[in-house]
Image: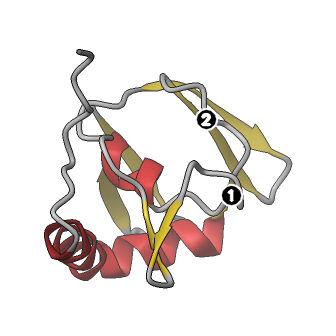
Amino acid sequence: MQAEVVFDNGSRFSFSAEFLRVQSPAADSKIRTIQGEKVITGRRHVGIMSVEQVGNYGLRITFDDLHNTGIYTWDYLYNLGLNKFMLMKDYIKILRKYNLSRDPQRLK
């Protein structure tokens, strides 16, 4: 699933739901801390259930893992758009460093 954000200056960014979920600005975004690094795993197939505008401030995104506490400000989304390839590369690098996966854990 992709979400597209268009800004008044004509900039347009397309984000995967996984990318937005792992870059959540919320403090309680199910973060796992390993040696001081914050890591969110298993979100490759996460989806977006809804998006609501929060005043003129930004967006609240509800994901299908029921995470919805972060508000993505317009400045934050713009920064994510400008840096999305570097941020995704860093995310994958951290997962590999700790032998973790973007895929959800399978139930036993």
Locate residue 94, reporting x and y percent: 25, 75
The secondary element bearing badge 1 is classed as: loop
Protein image colouring: secondary structure
Locate residue 66, reporting x and y percent: 59, 25
Rounded to the nearest whole Å, what is the CA distance between mark 2 and mark 1?
9 Å
Q: Is residue 48 left or right of residue 96?
A: right
Number of on-image labels = 2
Q: Residue furthest right?
A: 55
The secondary element bearing badge 2 is classed as: loop
Which residue position is annotated with label 2? 67
Locate residue 25, reporting x and y percent: 63, 63
Q: Is residue 71 left or right of residue 63?
A: right
Residues at marks 2 and 1 touching, judged by CB atoms closer than 8 Å: yes
Classify residue 1 by image quadrant: top left
Which residue shows up at 55% across the image and 57% down it?
24
Could you tell me the amino acid type at mark 2?
A: His
Which residue shows up at 26% across the image and 33% down it?
104
Q: Nearer the viewer, residue 68 or 34?
A: 34
10 Å crowding of disc 2: few (<14), some (14-19), many (20+): some
Residue 39 vs 75, above or below: the answer is above
Locate residue 54, reporting x and y percent: 80, 45
Q: Quadrant of the C terminus?
A: top left
Which mark, residue 26?
1
Q: Residue furthest top?
A: 108
